[in-house]
Image (cartoon, coloured by chain):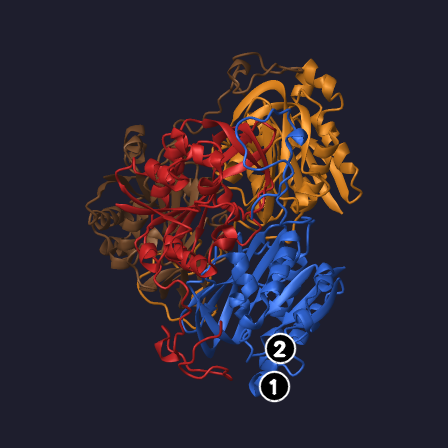
Chain colours: A blue, B red, C orange, D brown
Amino acid sequence: MIRVTVWGENVHEQKSEVVRKVYPEGMHECIAAGLREDAGLAVRTATLQQPDHGLTPEVLAETDVLTWWGHCAHKQVDDAIVERVQERVLGGMGLIVLHSGHFSKIFKRLMGTSCALKWREAGERERVWVCNPGHAIARGLGECFELPNEEMYGEPFGIPAPDEQVFIGWFEGGEVFRSGCCWRRGAGKVFYFQPGHETYPIYRDANVQLVLRNAVNWAAPEGGWAEPLKAPNVPVEKAREKLTPKGPSLHKPGEAGFR
Amino acid sequence: MIRVTVWGENVHEQKSEVVRKVYPEGMHECIAAGLREDAGLAVRTATLQQPDHGLTPEVLAETDVLTWWGHCAHKQVDDAIVERVQERVLGGMGLIVLHSGHFSKIFKRLMGTSCALKWREAGERERVWVCNPGHAIARGLGECFELPNEEMYGEPFGIPAPDEQVFIGWFEGGEVFRSGCCWRRGAGKVFYFQPGHETYPIYRDANVQLVLRNAVNWAAPEGGWAEPLKAPNVPVEKAREKLTPKGPSLHKPGEAGFR
Amino acid sequence: MIRVTVWGENVHEQKSEVVRKVYPEGMHECIAAGLREDAGLAVRTATLQQPDHGLTPEVLAETDVLTWWGHCAHKQVDDAIVERVQERVLGGMGLIVLHSGHFSKIFKRLMGTSCALKWREAGERERVWVCNPGHAIARGLGECFELPNEEMYGEPFGIPAPDEQVFIGWFEGGEVFRSGCCWRRGAGKVFYFQPGHETYPIYRDANVQLVLRNAVNWAAPEGGWAEPLKAPNVPVEKAREKLTPKGPSLHKPGEAGFR
Amino acid sequence: MIRVTVWGENVHEQKSEVVRKVYPEGMHECIAAGLREDAGLAVRTATLQQPDHGLTPEVLAETDVLTWWGHCAHKQVDDAIVERVQERVLGGMGLIVLHSGHFSKIFKRLMGTSCALKWREAGERERVWVCNPGHAIARGLGECFELPNEEMYGEPFGIPAPDEQVFIGWFEGGEVFRSGCCWRRGAGKVFYFQPGHETYPIYRDANVQLVLRNAVNWAAPEGGWAEPLKAPNVPVEKAREKLTPKGPSLHKPGEAGFR
């Protein structure tokens, strides 16, 4: 059983009539419902408005894969929570970043780049092409799938070169975008998936739901890296090869390193 | 002419008699002197103690490659300066991160990972092996070079998979380390180079100096990415293909995107 | 159930008294026995001497992961079989290349590089370090493991930059080596694992056996790429967007492309 | 001065009236003329029909970057010449593979994958987007450039994940393609560039010519890897650390390794 936490910013649904019509139950609940069609997934949701944004140490400890949708309230996400999520990713938790989540604090922090892109909200057609039909995240898809209305996201996308390119999007207005990208950070797997503008029912699309189920299965921890932030000192007497200290020293025995 | 700024934390030299004996002129001045042996490099230095840590917008705008050595005062580096350096790297400036700079704010920010490692200060022998004899950063080196005394840095090193592995270090006490790693972030090239503990005269070593000159030449900008943080809206009427807007909208025309 | 075929060159065992003493049952049978301790693996063996080297289309079609140990008879492997194996890897089959298999036709073909390395047969101690404790292939290992006697393999190793670095080896004689490397080729995963010189009982080592079981589980197909060599023509009338042909043509309708 | 050899298959120009009208001087001469506008390039041409296909050891030894256009006669390229070119790439020579060269023996050999793709010859519009405005190969381009008529090449493209993605193409008929990809193989840099169907005057396009000049400059050797195919034995007495041989041996002292 893979334990999934679906995180939703949950602001547009509260403030915008347009979005509420598309997702009366909240985007996070729609995403969660799609995932629940996979009997191997145990899915819960969390939102910005909850204490700790719903991401307490306990919740994260019990989360194998976290999905992240945010947009207008990126700045309201507490830095301490972002650090907590990052540490869990480095320790093995999978992370699926959705659509406007490209500008979330957690994604920018894990990528180290701008994560910027071009955009246009015109409800144009997108066709998402599969670059590797054998990839776990593309399982069960055809050579491509179409979204009748989507926000355009266009290159250049300010990301490090993906470890694996799973999807590239074609837009009616003439742009292209790296719509599905994989990276490993520490022991954790990260997948960015572009579709998901809040004013269209993208997360009700069968192909999109399939991709999300595939992605969550792909991102489930393979193992774990306990205490990934630790930088252990190895005392001379515990060196694997016999060693006699030489030269001057800055640190005294047993002293912690600088950070 | 490649314009290089050598940044030095410049704290150990002021506080530790041991370090001052090794680098009476300051580590940054020793590093700069080694670079100045390449007539194609225009080298200046900057330190933590200067206003803006010596990294004003003007200095960065005139810097093609920045080298970074820091250790005990990582936390004293102002976050605003770190952001400024990051933006310049994304825009094309090269960055050479040295030794204990693995835990600097700027390196952790660009990598997105822990950047943690094992360590031991025993003055043991290190042998740095070349993994790709044809790489620009290895030019002029033999198959390996030795440092009679170095701090041990050991795997696991908490970094994203390097785009290119240039060096791997062998340590007398039995460890190994990815001692020379390349990444691209935005338009900028980043090189991490492990040798350089402050209590040994590493930056006076001829091979180390050669590596640094090579690295600076390799990291010089190939071009540039103007305004790398910008996420431009493409209005419907400027779409490359003729487009009729469809579906509901969240944004009003001309409105900026969310960050 | 993951179906594994363990391929053995099976020449040293026949010709060399030294090797026969270490592996009286044949190296491939020893490797297979180690894998069979995982109840989720269905393991068979195949050898050079069999018709089609034991790798008929039927056997490959029923193989999820193939392991490959070869050394003195690389050149005797039929090119047609190598192509067949490559096509299966591109279609999704995992491939684990062992030790001297670095110079096998199939590994060189999948890498596209020299796959050359330094070597010394002195029975020296090797310590294999884990670079990513959270990787599936390192599951259950400590921070490193030791082999009291191993052939030295040293850098530079003529490979493309690995997608993931799992192990790096430290050798008593002073060298280092990228001992565990991952790549994806088409839909297939490839893992190279350095330990395994034929004159030492490496494949009886508990840690080595654990790595092999982990690697086989990691390399099992995630999905598949049917007919990975096919380059399909998309006729104008089947274009996803309505299209009117323009300009001169070389190909007649329905004609196959050139290869 | 970078020494460039432009290799042309030179068959369509001889056999097809359509192609001859577009390139009466031969495609290779048109490509060479575009490169010669860069005063830092010394450009010559070579063709399939010449002895050694014009790629004698002497010519290759004097070539810093080789460009390759082939299509209907891939199979006529001699395997020995392909090996010779591969060895030079591993030793440091740059290689620019053009359009239908995706199915050339040399590209398939260096990639290790199918290099297959979708295609359609309908003279449709292509728009080539820049994924990294700071990359050397994109220098001087705008955010994209258009080709009024081009053969469609579509995903999935059977390649290893590119080290760097420079361009992605958008096609009028609805497909996308990774149109500009970089890899390093040994000491050599490899760039694949998709535009260039023989029935349209693509190599007369100013942006395409600029890309080719940029690519040649990018691919010029940074250094070199002498004898990249060599796998040197390191005798015990030459080990960097003092070593006493242990355990049984297969090889006698001074014996060459197996290949």
Amino acid marked by disc 1? Lys
Judging by the rendered image, the residue that carries numbered circle 1 is A21
Q: How many marks can you see? A: 2
Residue D159 position, x and y percent, is: 49, 49
Pick the residue in front: D53 or A70.
Answer: A70
Q: Earlier in the sequence, mark 1 or mark 2?
A: 2
**B12 displayed left or right of A228:** left
Reply above or below: A78 against B181. below
**Real-space CA distance between mark 1 and mark 2, rounded to the nearest whole angstrom:** 14 Å
Pick the residue in front: B111 or A172.
Answer: B111
* Foreground disc of the pair 1, 2: 2
Crowding around mark 2 (Cα neighbors within 10 Å: few <14, some 14 to 19, many 20+) is many
Residue D60 position, x and y percent, is: 31, 33
Residue at figure coordinates x 61%, y 83% from the top left: A14
Judging by the rendered image, the residue that carries numbered circle 2 is A10
Give residue D39's mark: none
Residue at figure coordinates x 55%, y 62% from the top left: A107
Residue A94, quarter of the rendered image = bottom right
Pick the residue in front: A132 or A88.
Answer: A88
Residue A195 appears in the picture as rendered: no
Element under label 2? loop
Residue D173 position, x and y percent, is: 42, 68
Residue C176 position, x and y percent, is: 55, 30
Crowding around mark 1 (Cα neighbors within 10 Å: few <14, some 14 to 19, many 20+) is some
**C66 displayed left or right of A192:** right
Residue at figure coordinates x 61%, y 14% from the top left: D244
Pointer 2 chain: A
Element under label 1? helix
Amino acid marked by disc 2? Asn
